[in-house]
Amino acid sequence: MCAAADDTIAALASAPGPAGVAVVRVSGPAVPEIAQRLIGRLPEPRRAVLARFRDAGGSTIDQGVVLYFAAPASFTGEHVLELQGHGGPVLVDELLSRLLELGARLAGPGEFSERAFLNDKLSLDQAEAIADAIAAGSRVSARAAIRSLEGAFAREVEALVEALTRLRVYTEAAIDFPDEDDVDFLGDGEIERRLSAITRELAALRAQAAQGAVFRDGLRLVILGRPNVGKSSLLNRLARRETAIVTDIAGTTRDVLQQQLSIDGLPLVLVDTAGLRETEDPIEAEGVRRARAEIATADRILLVIDDRTGLSAADRTLLDEIDAEIEVTLIANKIDLSGRDPGMANVDGRPTVRVAAIDGRGFDALGAHLKSLVGIEDNAEPAFVARRRHLVALDRAAEALADGHERLVVDGAGDLLAEELRLAQNALGEITGRVSSDDLLGEIFSSFCIGK
Ligand SMILES: Nc1nc2c(ncn2[C@@H]2O[C@H](COP(=O)(O)OP(=O)(O)OP(=O)(O)O)[C@@H](O)[C@H]2O)c(=O)[nH]1
Ligand SMILES: [Mg+2]
């Protein structure tokens, strides 16, 4: 991570490779001087001007549009120069070399966004939303990322932090003046009421953030089941293409196969696996081992069964193993052969979808079921994107509130409650970056692309 910067960075902000236009971005205190020497003047801020980019000898490297943003009214909060030249890789290289000669250095990944964060232009979750918007794989995910960038998530977090601050102040006052006017501030229920309200709001935000995380990373569904029940057929039908090999030979799939797709904008990662059974074949046995190893990576298991036979003894043993770890949906396949109706059912007390992978019957119900798992009905969209680190922070805040509640009602200890409120505040502060460590910042920004 860089300290609040006294150096000037430069990078290609548009995609590398031949293109109509290439945008090179420069940010830092040396920008006015660099502009003087590169194009002979410092343009008026926020005015597009056409200029020649000149090398040390005064000959033209390229010509293009130049935009100057004066600090602090820029993306990074520093002086920024945007040079829009022709998108030839050789021209871009020459221009960047010239900028280095003039005192800039090449930016590292995410360094522009990091400076924007350090200069209070963006909260940490907003900076992350930029990277998420760029990397988004579906329209719904991209729009959720843009809502985060506009501050939808940060505002909710800030509102909770403010409520916590007010409650802390109130609690501290109750400790300092325990029996003012014969009122028992700690015991009169007001603190507990406000604490409960904040806890409920936090839980609601956690649910929204969990949705946001699914839309960022995709819901990972691992398909398990006995050989030949139609696991690969299920994958192919959902993906609408022949990704996996399907045959009537039990033990066709040996490797773990992964496919990304989306249902009405809900991104999914589907994982097809080898049919689970005891086998002497060393290759198949390795496949079975790998299939089992996927269980731990799943957000949910789709356990495929043949609807004619229902749950086998082996399926039940497997379910017993999985149960503690992860939720399961049963997919009762081959209803064309069993003669049952497609759609949602209940087998052994578990959510079950009856389908025929061979002709697609029941797949509407399966799609609706998957959307309902993340709390998305019809075409609703998540309010913002979130990352796993945000969920962890929200969980830590919830834990602190629960501990604080216990300190209050069990021990009547206002000072211990105040301390837990502080911990909850800190956990929330990590989301927006109000509370952050250099390690955390380094980790976040190094995953960005260069020029962002
Ligand atoms: N009639 C009928 N046959 C199906 C259906 N789904 C799959 N099959 C057939 O069942 C056989 C096995 O299908 P796969 O998709 O390869 O099954 P799998 O579970 O991936 O099998 P392994 O990879 O060997 O574990 C193939 O002949 C499919 O055509 C279905 O809904 N109805
Ligand atoms: Mg298969």
Image (cartoon, helix red, strand yellow):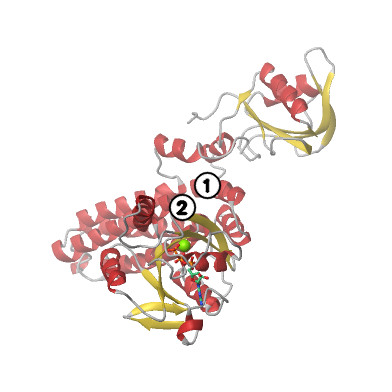
Left or right: residue 88 versus residue 127 is: right
Does the residue tagged 1 have its C-beta within 8 Å of any atom of ligand 2?
A: no
On the rendered structure, is 4 left or right of 405? right
Q: Quadrant of residue 280?
A: bottom left
Q: Position of residue 330 (x, y in %)?
A: 40, 74
- Residue 236 appears left or right of 45: left
Q: Which residue is mark 2?
A: 387
Q: Secondary structure at mark 2?
A: loop
Disc ID at residue 128 = 1
Q: Amino acid at mark 1?
A: Glu
Q: Residue at x 15, y 65 (%)?
A: 410
Q: Is residue 175 visible?
A: yes
Q: Is residue 23 above or below residue 106?
A: below
Residue 132, position as x, y percentages in the image? 56, 50
* Label 1–label 2 contact, CB within 8 A: yes
Under tag 1, what secondary structure?
helix
Q: Nearer the viewer, residue 159 or 82?
A: 82
* Residue type, numbered disc 2: Arg
Can the viewer see residue 385? no
